[in-house]
Image (cartoon, coloured by chain):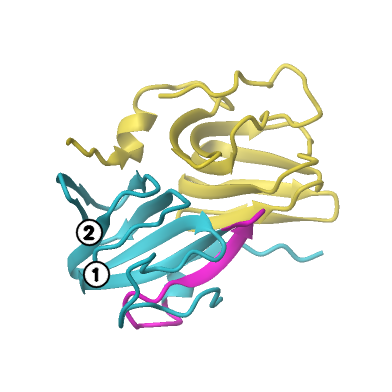
Chain colours: A yellow, B cyan
Amino acid sequence: MKYEAINFQDKFGRFSDHWAPRVIAQLNDYQFKLVKIRGDFVWHEHADTDEAFLVLAGEMRIEFRDGQVDLGPGEMFVVPRGVEHKPSAREECQVLLIEPRGVVNTGEAGGALTALNDVWV
Amino acid sequence: MKYEAINFQDKFGRFSDHWAPRVIAQLNDYQFKLVKIRGDFVWHEHADTDEAFLVLAGEMRIEFRDGQVDLGPGEMFVVPRGVEHKPSAREECQVLLIEPRGVVNTGEAGGALTALNDVWV
């Protein structure tokens, strides 16, 4: 049988839009999603799940109502369920998200930045 | 409140043994574990869960009974549940594992390389 590595840079080369996560792998009922971000996202929360951000290239910030965390390459953070947060990046940043399948990027906030779900690349 | 990034290199600097995963973060009931590997691990499987390998530095191989996959930095692979596999690395390789909390590193094979579980760093 043929087993193939999933290469992040290869996958990132296949899309260019921002704030639109692409699924690259599934682990049980969890998904690994690559996303390119730039600018400000919307304040939102995920009531039913934590959400992991792992930065692969560039720099991003996650703001909370009572603080913030800055992430660079080789760093990660898990946003706890139910905690309002707003991701942002001054320049394009490449991020790996890990969360249960079906999580909508804007959570319960909705709006124009709501992306299609379960789109594989 | 103080929010702190989890930095992989900082965490790797805190231990040196091989094949002994350290938990660095939890996402719902899943854990992110850093592990340094070198040499050959044992053939084993996890009957109840998939297991994700994400290489942060170095090179590793995952052998299967009918093939293999080589992983380098910026690459990942999800071993499906119930599939026998044997990780190995010629030189030290730094890996991020993602799997449900409680998964034993040697699966149902046991043996001398079985590591303590749920050890945080």
Give whichever of A29, A81 is nearer the camera. Answer: A29
Mark 2 element type: strand
Q: Is B97 on the left-hand or right-hand side of B23?
A: left
**Residue A79: which numbered mark, if any?**
none
- Residue A39 picture location, percent across and down: 63, 32
Q: For this rendering, which residue is in front, A79 or B61?
A: B61
Pointer 2 chain: B
Q: Which residues are magenta?
A: B13-30
Residue extending furthest toward the right: A65
Neighbourhood count class around disc 2 (C-alpha, 10 Å): few under 14, some 14–19, many 20 upward: many
Residue B39, image x, y percentages:
18, 72
Q: Mark 1 falls within which chain?
A: B
Task: Identify the residue at image location x=80%, y=41%.
Answer: A47
Q: Quadrant of residue B36?
A: bottom left
Secondary structure under tag 1 reads loop
- The location of residue A50, given as percent across then percent down, is 69, 48
- What residue sits 64% from the left and 54% below the top? A78
Which comes sooner in the sequence, label 2 or label 1?
1
* Residue type highlighted by circle 1: Phe
Residue corresponding to mark 1: B41
